Image: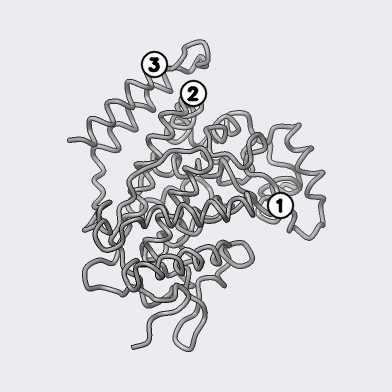
Amino acid sequence: MQKSKNLVKHLVLFSMVDKRRMPSSSSRILAAALAIFMACIFLPVSHAQLSSSFYDDSCPGLSEIVLTVVMQAQILDPRMPASLIRLHFHDCFVDGCDGSVLLDDSEDIVSEKSANPNKNSARGFDVIDDIKSAVEAVCPGVVSCADILALAAEASVSLSGGPSWDVQLGRRDGTTANKDGANNNLPSPFDALDTLQSKFAAVGLNDVDLVTLSGAHTFGRAQCKFFSSRLYNFSGTESPDPSLNPSYLMELEENCPNGGDGTTLNDLDPTTPDAFDGNYFFNLVNGQGLLQSDQELYSDSSASTTATIVDSYANNEDSFFDNFAVSMINMGSISPLTGSDGEVRTNCRQVNES
């Protein structure tokens, strides 16, 4: 019931958008609002046995410990908040939110860190180690690495100017990794819209979650190799992606010359690269989505689905923030291990000794 009340509030927010800022396609925006409302009501997401109060007695002050360590990491490296939320995302999309992305190679484990979506790009593992050490010092053997990832993601967003939410806790850590799953299940920067939709649907997330969670690309960086084909040989045409804003294309070509090594970093949001805000959606409307998977959300093929949601968020940052909190809880509830399943790792990089 409370969830329905919150969604009604979101619809009211949509109706209060400043009409002077709304494009002529205002009916599309209102349709998107209704779509969000209906989708969130009729797509139930099980939060299993998770609870925001799970550690209230066993590890009071946990959230403050996580927040402090993430804040220190952000001061040293402004990119870190975006990297930490990406770790949580890459964990949950592979066999659920079980901390498997954190495991190193061992005699029994082939690490997900060497999978293509993670190799030389996933980062922040040392920050998770620092959080785990700080937590173990006061609450030994209590807090799972999977829960630390979820808390670090929320802290990263809130510290960067985005929304806060009550993180659902009580996950336990898995004892295996799935490199093949990381290679096949994670959304790719090269994916077409229908592929993105299929990958999200496979873990119980809908189009609203897809667009909303993609909004995390409002901060962070990406290497040239993940989008350079859009600049020089889009879909084998030997020409740029026609959806790219011409001035943005020139900027990217300068930063990513044809034939370069592909490792140069580029802001996912060229306007406010280290802030969590709604500018990502303005960028899509203006043809300034960096990755193909970003711009796909506002492509011709998306006109009746995701584009309407992009329009709505471009005109109402509050609605994006509200729904981002909901979608993060939805994502964090993908197939968690609870109760006596799994374990609470002492070291996030390796399973406990039997």
Q: Residues within 10 Å of mark 1 (few under 14, many from 20)?
A: some
The outermost residue toward the front is 138
Image mark count: 3
Residue 79 vs 3, above or below: the answer is: below
Q: Amino acid at mark 2?
A: Asn
* Residue hosting label 1: 265
Which residue does the image show at 43% across and 22% down from the upper left? 28
Looking at the rendering, which quadrant does residue 41 occupy? top left
**Considering the image in quadrants, where does the N terminus appear?**
top left
* Residue hosting label 3: 16
Q: Amino acid at mark 3?
A: Met
Q: Residues within 10 Å of mark 3 (few under 14, many from 20)?
A: few
Percent of width and height locating residue 262: 75, 57
In depth, the one of 283 and 192 nearer the eye is 283
Q: Earlier in the sequence, mark 2 or mark 3?
A: 3
Looking at the rendering, which quadrant does residue 72 occupy? bottom right
Q: Secondary structure at mark 2?
A: loop
In depth, the one of 335 and 52 nearer the eye is 52
Residue 177 vs 135, above or below: the answer is: below
Percent of width and height locating residue 78: 63, 49
Residue 5 placement, left or right of 64: left
Residue 248 placement, left or right of 342: right
Q: Amino acid at mark 1?
A: Leu
Q: Earlier in the sequence, mark 3 or mark 1?
A: 3
In depth, the one of 282 and 249 nearer the eye is 282
* Residue hosting label 2: 315
Residue 5 vs 354, above or below: the answer is: above
Residue 22 vs 213, above or below: the answer is: above
**Considering the image in quadrants, where does the C terminus appear?**
bottom left
* Spatial separation of the CA atoms under disc 1 and disc 2: 29 Å
